[in-house]
Amino acid sequence: MSNVSYYISNLLEKMTSTDKDFRFMATNDLMLELQKDSIKLDEDSERKVVTMLLKLLEDKNGEVQNLAVKCLAPLVSKVKEPQVETMVDTLCSNMMSDKEQLRDISSMGLKTVIAELPLSSSGLSLTVCVCKKITSQLIGAMGKQEDVSVQLEALDILSDMLGRLSGALVSFHSSLLSSLLPQLTSPRMAVRKRSILALGHLVPCCSPTLFSQLTEHLLTELAKGPPASMTRTYIQCLATISRQGGHRVGEHLEKLIPMVVKFTGVEDDELREYCFQAFEAFIRRCPKEMSPHVATVTQLCLKFMTFDPNYNYDDEEQQEEDSMDVEEGLDEESDDEYSDDDDMSWKVRRSSIKCLEALIHTRRDLLLSFYSSICPALLARFKEREENVRADVFAAFSTLLRQTRVGSGHHGNVKAGSDSALSREEEPAVAMLETQVPVIVKTLHRQLKEKSIKSRQGCFCLLTELSHTVPGALEQHIPALIPGIVFSLTDKSTSSTMRIDALSFFHVLLLSHPPQAFQPHMQVLLPPVVACVEDSFYKITSEALLVAQQLVRVMRPQGPSATAGRFDPKPFVKEVFSATLKRLKATDIDQEVKERAISCMGHMVCHLGDHLGAELQGVLAIFLERLKNEITRLTAVRTITLISVSPLKINLSSILPETLSALGSFLRKNQRALKLGTLACLTALVTHHAASIKPAALEPVLSELPALVDEGDMHVSQVSVTLLTCMAKWCPSSLAKISSSVLPGVFRLVHSPLLQGAALAAILDFLQALVLSKASNLGYSQLLKSLTEPFHRSQSSDSTILHRQSYQSVARCVAALSSSCSKETPATVASLMQEVKNPGCPESARVLALLCLGELGRSGSLGRSKEVQGVILEAISSTNEEVKTAASCALGSMAVGSLDEYLPFLLKEISAQPRRQYLLLHSLKEVISACPASSLSAHVESIWALLFDNCECQEEGTRNLVAECLGKLTLVNAAQLLPRLKQLLRAGSPLARSTVVTAIKFTIVDQPAPIDSLLKECIGDFLKTLQDDDLNVRRVALVMFNSAAHNKPSLIRGLLATVLPHLYKETQIRKDLIREVEMGPFKHTVDDGLDVRKAAFECMYTLLDSCLEGLNVLQFLDHVEEGLKDHYDIRMLTFLMLARLASLCPAAVLQRLDRLIEPLKATCTTKVKAGSVKQEFEKQEELRRSAMRAVAALLAVPEVERSPSMADFANQIRTNADMASIYQSVQGGEGGGLGSAESMDIS
């Protein structure tokens, strides 16, 4: 300690030296010392350092002064409170000094101190104390009307302080407001502007009453009709506080809008600009509240976006050639009285266009009306003469295009093709856009040749958006666009960014339009692109190589787009080839250029390999080199894959052996993308070039495969098995040693509980190919034995590890093997039936045998066997539950294989055997789910009659099964069966009604289906059951509604207005459904309405994802708020909803923040009663974590801590060790925590 004190007192002594260099060096050393974390000062040193630094602020030398200010920053956190206060007091009094230099340096000092004040709870008292001191001094300084520079500095510091520490100044807000408002009338423009900034920082945290007071003040002042400059200030202030205050302005809009509208009529361009800026702020911050005023604002914007009183556009349109003369003539006439520099009308145009852009951005629901009103107006403004304004017109139009595109994939997570009606809804907007394409191109293609770079960039950006929104729309207009693209690529004065923009647009154009459109223009297009490939700037080269790659595909398309219109690529090959080869050979270039050169050359070999002649082998040798280089190997692997599947049958024999050994070594690497790429490459090589591959060459590959066939990564396993299948088909001799290496792994995978879908299909293919290849010494019987062996072990410890899924997988494998070796099937069937009949067999073997029989029956290889029916029926009567279930599955599968034989038998059994009804209905469900509609249609009536008889069954499980069968059967013939369900709904008992509504749930599938249009017409009738008297019917109606909202939101979007009130009604706690049950000495409360409420909240959660724009978020939040105080399950759901809402509609959440925080706080701070059971503790812990996730999501919203209650709660979390640790753990697992919670699927 003493060392530091001694060193510092030494420095302080030097600071008093008369030599400025000494002072400078000493101050610099002090600054370095203070920046060390380890430094601790005693009280005496602190006082001396502070005094000395404050003295140095008045030093004669400017450099010393600057260093002294820099020392203040680290000092704030190193000294105790009294010293900070001394610093602040001195700096504030210096602010009032008559010396300008001292004033400036002190205000810099104050800003430095403010920026360093601690925000954490431990330092909060200091911060509040310092802020109060500064504030009271600044309020005094603002009152000094005689010296403007003092006022300006004071306002500047105040803005800084409010921006960073507004929450700490709550007690000062009203005095700040009353001292800032008079400044708005200051004669000095700068003072007024800075006061507006300060007010902007004050608004987000101030209380609602203060906000109203400020708004009222502005309204009153505006109503007095002040002079123009004052009016401008007030309107500007309005715009700023709405930008900063967000949703709060919503309540005052009714009064504000007419006032602002009135001022747009005043002949003052700057005032009009501020008016439109205010409108823009209103629209962005309160889109919902602005609804009644949208029409008015749109009209004004459309009127003023063409406001250009000093310029005549009509002449330009009529006679473009003479337009310059006309313009010059105009200028000469009005030269003496008017100069173009005074023209402010462009600001009005720009602000009105920005306002329109905000409107388009926030109100997607009005898209169609925008196309009829705003779209033509924007198109007409493409001719705007002012470059900056034109850029804004392009930006607004691009926003319109983006909004049109967003519609077809709302929130970006709608599965492809999952909601065809969604895209159908968007079609009117797209159709309207398509009619405008010729107009767009007509106006833009001229501008593409203008000198102005900003304009051209705007054009390319807009055309790129257009190509993304309506792919193929520009096909007819490509000849008109090509000169513009070529101009931007070849013009000498063009900047490199402009070239990159032109190339990237050209790339998008090539990707989104058919090759035939470009072929006639190849002569014009290719040279500029090749020149760009040879450019010295790597970004241009890299972008140009992408374009060249697409042009190669255009020269000779492959696949479905290759048509008979023969185009001869020969004249162009050499040009592209030599430019690309030069880049491919270079090793001292950018990584991206290397990769794209490999890829581009790969496409050349793939599409035009037969034109390369002798050059081809040299290129392949370079690919082999790149394959051996760690940096480029992944791209090289993908390129070799591409070449090997080329229809030109490129001869790869010169590089095959080395390629295969390199690929084998890649399978050992950790990089997953490389593994997958390598496996795909090997599969392509084995499939297309088997003749050139020697079996020995594949051995290094085979030795790596066992490690890849593993349940840890199903996708890699699937691709590996696909490679094995190709080997079995094309190079069977290479698989001679497979039984000891890869096969055990494949069987382990078959027995894995995780195997399903594509990976299982790959294994089925492999087993069939293996049996047919006859190469390995593995015949049918050995494979069968390996598959079924684990199930035949007696009930010892290791039989418990067999999962239900593995039974299904093995059964399918057995059926696949049998279908390949039909001669073996009868014997297999006989032995399987023996196993089922033999009670001495282990249960697992009997269950497997039944499932195998079912799968064999499904593939139709059982034959007509009465004996099988007997065996199955006997098994269904078994006492063993597992065997019974397996038998019902098997019966269903057999019926799928031969409907006419098994279905009548199944229906008869269901009627005759009420005790086995549940199991037999399972079989029937399997039949209805798996059979194609065409084969079922003959049996529909008989099945329907049977289900109809059972739809009022008392047993809920059976009823749900009947409902599922009814729903899936309705899909077979919707036109006939849907009306019957409707009829049953009207006539039936509560049980029948609940069955019908559940059946409707099963008609809503996530893929497009023929029933969709019929459902859309009548789903409203089924949703009326939300008002049913029966509680259970209401619950299943909510479940059905949730399923519709999740899988096909388009069905219910139009009905939200009528359905939501009933949905919200079900979220209320109903006292009449809560009853007390006596359990011995204890009384237990039972809430019969809980399930219905839970279903209602689940619906609300789903609607957030699928129908957000149909919701009134504030009303929605009212019910979320109620849910935050409800039962455990519902609170868990509402915490999830809150986290979701915080990211989707932050503005609305901020509006309700104060009401939402209380229940969150209550949950986070609850303690479980001592002596509670372990489950209680776990439940409460989970609740707190979930609530904390919601808090974390809220804290991620910008500006949230400006709310005093939230800032207070955030502090509480930081200071309370228990809550802080929960918060940390939730934050730490953000990827898993919040992410997984939000995406939880509860449909």
Image (cartoon, rainbow, N blue to C red):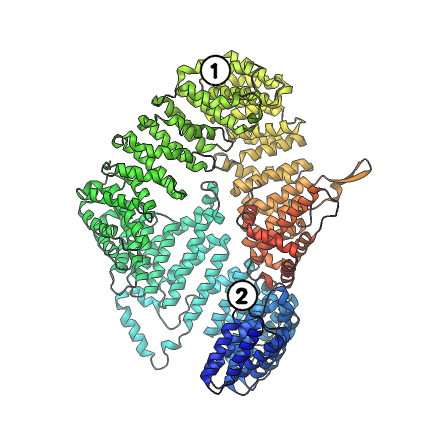
Q: Quadrant of the N terminus?
A: bottom right
- The residue located at (47%, 26%) in the rendering is 932
Percent position of residue 317, x then y = 31, 64
Badge 1: how crowded within 10 Å, few (<14), some, or many (20+)? Answer: many
Q: Which residue is mark 2?
A: 243
Q: Nearer the viewer, residue 469 or 337?
A: 469
* Mark seen at residue 829: 1
Percent position of residue 1047, x then y = 52, 40
Percent position of residue 10, x then y = 53, 80
Q: Earlier in the sequence, mark 1 or mark 2?
A: 2
Q: Nearer the viewer, residue 780 or 663?
A: 663
Q: Give the residue type at disc 2.
A: Arg
Q: Nearer the viewer, mark 1 or mark 2?
A: 1
Residue 872 appears in the rendering: yes
Q: Quadrant of residue 106?
A: bottom right
Judged from the image, the secondary structure of the residue bearing numbered disc 1 is helix
